[in-house]
Amino acid sequence: MENDDPYRPANVRVYKFNDTVDHLILKPMAQGYQFVTPRLVSRGVTNFFSNLGEPRVIMNDLFQGKLRQAIGDATRFGVNSLAGVGGLFDIATPFGLPKHDEDFGQTLAIWGWKDSAYVMLPGLGSSSTRDVVGIAVDFFTYPLLYYHDIGTRNALYVLQLVDHRANLLDAEAVLNQAASEDERYDFVREAYTQQRENEIYDGNAPLDLPYKLDNDTPDTGGKPKQ
């Protein structure tokens, strides 16, 4: 266990801190948001922020040599931005342009950084030493960062956080059923590790991984993702 999780003592402390903040602030906000927001509206908010992440996906498609996927994702971004009213509506998926999720952490893994220690980040949740570098790079590819009105930009960041947390409420219910209080840290760590390997290998992981990937593992992302 220690070899798989060399920073475990610090990670557990950060996990407990994140969990406390989540239960005191984020979860109540997410539940209130879910209660007052019509499903169609909340789906539009999720679509909008997902569309803002497409430039990051396209960039990492190219870094990973996935040229055909990059063309498809660029087309998807254009279609949803224009016909989908700024991404509020996902027009592209029904027309055969599915959503992909590529980031610089995955790119680093493709480039050769395979082994990476698990890290629990304050406020951000599950990550790894490799993915911390990836997060730093991806941060500068997010269009919202360059929006000139700071007040509006910060409000959108808060909305994105609350919407994301609301989308994880069902996953949290699965987590509560699958693991006791004492087991949750390990469950979240294993779920994140398997999820990342699945993303890196596009669902086709090599047979020599030290564990079996389970595509039914709930996507808690460590947040919850917190």
Image (cartoon, helix red, strand yellow):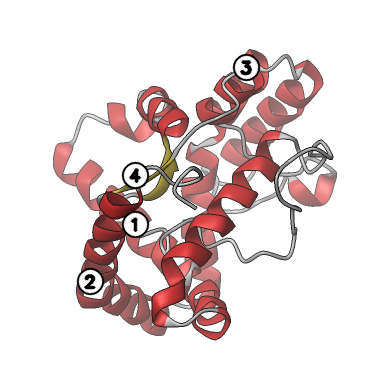
Q: Residue at x 83, y 45 (%)?
A: 95
**Distance in Å between CA atoms under marks 3 and 2:** 36 Å
Q: Amino acid at mark 1?
A: Leu
Which of the two discs, 3 and 2, labels the residue nearer the N terminus? Answer: 2
Answer with left or right where residue 99 lies relative to residue 46: right
The residue furthest left is: 151
Q: Amino acid at mark 3?
A: Gly
Circles 3 and 2: CB distance less than 8 Å?
Answer: no
Answer with left or right where residue 93 lies relative to residue 5: right
- Residue placed under numbered mark 4 in the picture: 7
Answer with left or right where residue 148 lies relative to residue 203: left
Which of the two discs, 1 and 2, labels the residue nearer the N terminus? Answer: 2
**Distance in Å between CA atoms under marks 1 and 2:** 16 Å
Mark 4 falls on what kind of element? loop
**Distance in Å between CA atoms under marks 4 and 3:** 22 Å
**Distance in Å between CA atoms under marks 1 and 4:** 27 Å
Q: Residues within 10 Å of mark 2 (few under 14, many from 20)?
A: few
Mark 1 falls on what kind of element? helix
Residue 57, above or below 41: above
Which of the two discs, 4 and 3, labels the residue nearer the N terminus? Answer: 4
Circles 4 and 3: CB distance less than 8 Å?
Answer: no
- Residue placed under numbered mark 2 in the picture: 20
- Expressed as whole percent of the image width and height from the top left, the position of residue 175 reads 52, 76
Query: Which of labels 1 and 2 is toward the front?
Result: 2
Mark 3 falls on what kind of element? loop
Q: Residue at x 43, y 27 (%)?
A: 138
- Residue placed under numbered mark 3 in the picture: 112
Q: Amino acid at mark 2?
A: Thr
Return the residue nearer the eye: 171 or 55.
171
- Residue placed under numbered mark 1 in the picture: 161
